[in-house]
Image: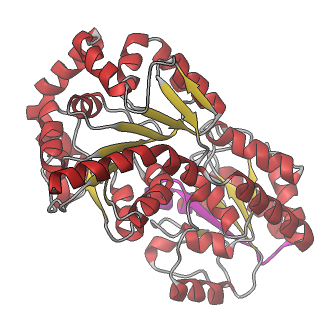
Amino acid sequence: MSFQADGRRGSFGVRKEAAVLAERFPFTFLAYRFLTAVLTPLSGLILTRRLKRGKEHPARLAERRGEPSLDRPSGPLIWVHGASVGEVVAALPVIERLRARDFTVLVTSGTVTSAELARARLPDGAFHQFVPLDSPWFVSRFLDYWQPDLALFVESDLWPNLILESADRRIPLILVNGRMSPRSFERWRRLPATIEALLMRFDLCLVRAPEDAERFGALGAPRISVTGNLKLDVPPLPADPKVLASLKAALAGRPLIAAASTHPDEEGVILSVHRRLRVEFPRLLTIIAPRHPERGSEVAEMAAAGGLDAVQRSSGALPNAATEIYVCDTLGELGLIYRLAPVVFMGGSLVPHGGQNPIEPIKLGAAVLHGPHVTNFADLYDALDADAQTGPVDDTRSLTTRLAGLLSDAKARHTLAAAGRGTIAALAGAADRSLTAIEPYLVQIRLEARARDA
């Protein structure tokens, strides 16, 4: 499906319109640029404060000022930017296809956890740098050094200076896996000139669903295509075989459930569910993986206060026969949990957060349950529920009932897991559709590189 503002815009015509638009910045852009320039001398204080809170990498602070820590490879360079872990994960299928075409890929993001994920999962020929703070000087330094031939922005991390400066340098900008929540849409509608001027600088917006296309179009994006959700094409999460084997041995055939990416006010429900279930399943082990691992101690203390034996994975301990709650408060180990737990409850869905990504556990064979608050993945959860002829759980009682049924009925468990895998397989293909849309830009980059070499 494609949405186009009018017939005058070709594949590369948006850059010309962006150049004209640059003549008439909205006042908000001018104010933002002035403010970020004025605050640049305070960047050291800002970064130091973030470092103390664990939000920056101590050895790589210079990257946040646009200073490189790696040499730029020769030849064409594709730049892929995503805010954090979710966006970097979503970009992996596109990055892998770009590498298969022998393009070097620079990946930027803004969080320590996403940098760690990039280190572990980027293919050879793709490398990570922290995105610079959105200061005009830092952005210029970054772009002066890396000189990307094409920029792919993932989902909705739209930093004005980064986008404006890139467009001014005639770097083609493409939004991939674009999404626009109803809340974000309503916020941007209050600043129509600002968001239109920003979106007009994108050559192309590749979005996840028709609803996203309608919202981006209403806000002024000139060229939009619906390509689907890239996260459906992400390869299964990895797991260390030795660590997996040791955990399997420690569990020794116990009944097992997992609650993944949980948020505050959800762990209390999970602990109450565990207390109810252990009456029927006395050897039950419940794994809780909080969305923010630094909350592990808080979750373990909550379990202990409720009379449950809890162990934190960050302590290095494995669950023993007495352990009832295993708090997985380490990074990058959800692949282990999803391979172990036959049933997974996805967090962020019992509270109005919007739900977490169910694709990863489904791909690793788990039967997935969720609460009613799933706006972040509404279409996907609707499809999963329709194919499995099921629905959300609303509270402690309904979650207990559904888990008890799945723990005691292997056939029902396998049926739900198989339905999930079928849904994911049917909806996949966004990476190939995105690369098809991007292909003309890749051809142009190749031609320009040959011309320079000649």
Q: Which residues are magenta?
A: 280-300
Residue at image point 50% right, 82% down? 240
* Quadrant occupied by the N terminus: top right
Please state the horizontal and vertical placement of residue 101, each as a whole percent of the image: 40, 63
Residue 118 falls left or right of residue 279: left
* Residue 299 is one of the magenta-drawn residues: yes
**Furthest-left residue in view?**
41
- Is 208 situated left or right of 59 in this image? right
Viewer-closest of 298 and 257:
257
Picture quarter containing residue 250? bottom right
**Of the pair 346 and 268, the residue shown nearer to us:** 346
Viewport quadrant of the C terminus: bottom left
What residue is shown at x 36% (from left), y 23% (from top)? 198
Please, is residue 147 above or below residue 23 in the view?
below
**In this rendering, is residue 116 above or below 352?**
below
Viewer can see residue 273 = yes
Q: Residue at x 56, y 67 (%)?
A: 334
Left or right: 13 in relation to 238 = left
Residue 55, can we see it? no
Q: Position of residue 77 (x, y in %)?
A: 27, 54
